Image (cartoon, rainbow, N blue to C red):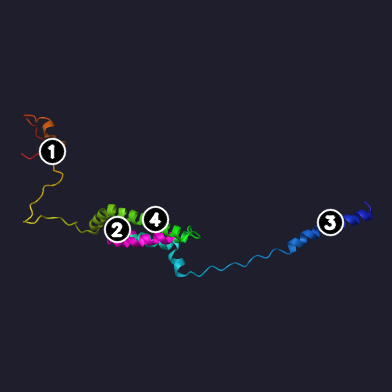
Amino acid sequence: MSKRSRKSSRQRLANQSKGKLDTRAKPQSFAPPVPKEAGGLIDFIEHPLFLAGVSIVGVIVGVVFYTPVLLVCVVCILLALHRSKVLRGQATLLQATAYGIVLILSVGLLWGVDVLVRKPAREYLQVASGSKPPIEAPNASVPARPPSIPVPSPGQLFNFPGMNSMAAPQPANPVRSMSAPV
């Protein structure tokens, strides 16, 4: 290679690399990070761990002791929907409708859970604490009512009250068991 060709190739390489280095030497300036808005109390209350803890305590207290405490759980569900920001930027009517639907569904669901779980949960806590569940004793003015499910007499374990005509005849000589007192 001649001196002239070497010199031109060096100059061409220098120009190419200089163009690449210029773009690297002047990087794009990025916008400074935007500080998080100081929401304070709302951010703390809408935090998922806080909502979960309050909801669990609210369900236990609401089912076992005082049913209106379940409204705390409904509020937690609505705050969780707000925290998700799914409805941000939507029309006000759409947001109100969505919050209303979530409110109705969560109230219905929690009320159904309360109806199904309240009595067994309260009885379990009474037995677990050592106290006996209250026994309903009839007053002298109110006649005692028969139990809803009659207790069968011996030998009639599978005979139901409406099926007496279909029952098998009793043997004339019943065999006594050894455990029966004489």
Q: Of helix, strand and loop, which one carries label 4?
A: helix
Which amino acid, by three-letter code, is at mark 3? Leu
Q: Find disc 4 in the rendering and name its residue.
A: 101
Residue drawn at x 17%, y 57% as measured from the top left:
134
Dot 2 and dot 3 residues touching (CB under 8 Å): no
Dot 3 and dot 1 residues touching (CB under 8 Å): no
Which amino acid, by three-letter code, is at mark 2? Val
- Left or right side of 77 for 33: right
Counting every numbered tag in the picture gives: 4
Structural distance between the alpha carbons of marks 3 and 1:
108 Å
Q: Of helix, strand and loop, which one carries label 3?
A: helix
Residue 118 figure quarter? bottom left
Q: Earlier in the sequence, mark 1 or mark 4?
A: 4
Dot 4 and dot 2 residues touching (CB under 8 Å): no
Q: How busy is the neighbourhood of tag 3: few (under 14 within 10 Å), some, or many (20 plus)?
A: few
Which amino acid, by three-letter code, is at mark 4? Ile
Q: Find disc 2 in the rendering and name its residue.
A: 63
In magenta, the rendered stretch is: 59-81
Q: Find disc 3 in the rendering and name its residue.
A: 13
Q: Position of residue 171 (x, y in %)?
A: 8, 29
Query: Is 176 or 44 nearer to us in this picture?
Result: 44
- Left or right side of 91 for 71: left
Q: Find disc 1 in the rendering and name its residue.
A: 161
